[in-house]
Amino acid sequence: MNKKKIVVGAGARRFGCAAKVFTIMALALAGCAGGTTESARRPSLTVASFDDLPGWQQDAQAETIGALRRSCPRLVSGEGTRIRMDSGEYHTTAEQWRRVCTAAEAVARDNHRGARAYFERYFDVLAVAGPDSDGRFTGYYEPEIKGSRVPSRRFTIPVYRRPPDLQNDKPYLTRTEIENGALRGRGLELAYVEDMIGLFEMHVQGSGRIALAEGGVMRLGFDGTNNRTYTALAKVLVDEGALKPDEATWPGIRAWLQKNPNRAREIMRKNDRYVFFKDTGRSGAVGAQGVALTSGRSMAVDPAFVPYGMPIYIDTTRPAPNKPGETMTFRRLMVAQDTGAAIKGPVRGDVFFGAGSAAADTAGRMNSSGRWWLLVPKKS
């Protein structure tokens, strides 16, 4: 199909980028020293079609309808959405989102054929063109560790809520200072855990679950950081020769930390960024858009390029279950509902795989190249 470059007006609005959930693969990447500049690598978009999407007919798009519905209340309010491009911005109004969101309510949750027809009727397909059309895809998940609402001989490590004197963008106490007790006695403890590696992992993810000794589960959501520099443990361990680059996935890093308990705390303190949590009281993980995430259908993006709530079709690979070193095709329709400290660039996706050991293994090993297409509401 002949593709037509989209040209739009200039004067694009600056997008916010609240780092809600950090990708687990940020441990294996360089972290976020610097960040994306507004003028760098803005994508060009070309008109495409659903016939251009590999595997589109085989996808179960009804699974995406539920994720899109969760984003709809935010899409239909405010000023709509804007996609940043080299020639300006592509703007979709709240009224256009209201039309497609209303139509989504009529699609049954298990009607994949109906869902496919819905997207083909109400959306246009835009492809990213130019040198940045090939992107990078990683995965993240919701970790779970054991803990208690009160301290005990077993559960001694505090999980802190946001301190009232923490100011946005102003450096706060370091990770070492906090872990050494600088916040002790201020009534900021949400819970107590026994696994310092598990808590660190939860800091990287930006959310998680605590299986309480008293019974039940406490859901934790991101509520800010100490505004200190993020340092990837993979880089630290590779630079020290403790791990080879291909071993620096999160499963490999976790195994090294567990085998080297005398150095684990020292190594983890190389990452000075500390995350504060809040008890969300919800039944699932919540992304930066403020909506509950859908396993296998929600994705973290760089909101400097792609707005929250945008459906995105991805063509990449993921680790094959129980087959180390092997991958399988991963083509599906996602919804942009989150972001993260290491998620930077016009084609940079972090797939949410849910909770549990299988999700942790897949997310921790995923680091694939691939492409994506944006689905935007039709103008009429």
Image (spheres, rainbow, N blue to C red):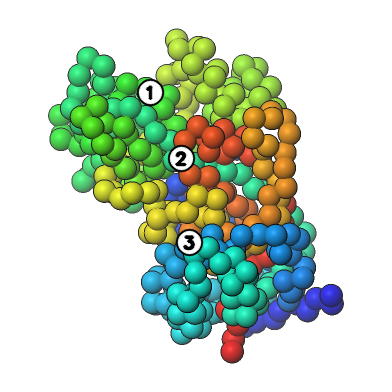
Mark 1 or mark 2, whichever is nearer to me: 2
Q: Is residue 85 left or right of residue 254?
A: right
Q: CA distance from mark 3 to mark 1?
A: 33 Å
> Is residue 306 toward the left or the right of residue 369 in the image?
left
Q: Could you say whether the residue bearing mark 2 is in a helix, strand or loop?
A: strand
Left-right relation of 188 to 74: left
Structural crowding at the residue carrying mark 2, measured as other residues with C-alpha within 10 Å and reported as few (<14), some (14–19) or many (≥20): some
Vertical position of residue 234 compared to residue 307: above or below = above
Closest to the camera, between mark 3 and mark 1, is: 3
Residue picked out by circle 2 = 355
Determine the image quadrant of residue 11.
bottom right
Query: Marks 1 and 2, how far apart in space?
Result: 19 Å
- CA gap, disc 3 and disc 2: 17 Å
Residue, disc 1: 196
Q: Earlier in the sequence, mark 3 or mark 2?
A: 3
State the residue at coordinates (58%, 59%).
334
Q: Please tell me which residue is depicted at 53% across the width and 63% down the height of the picture.
A: 110
For marks 1 and 2, the one nearer the N-term is 1
> Mark 3 or 1 closer to N-term?
3
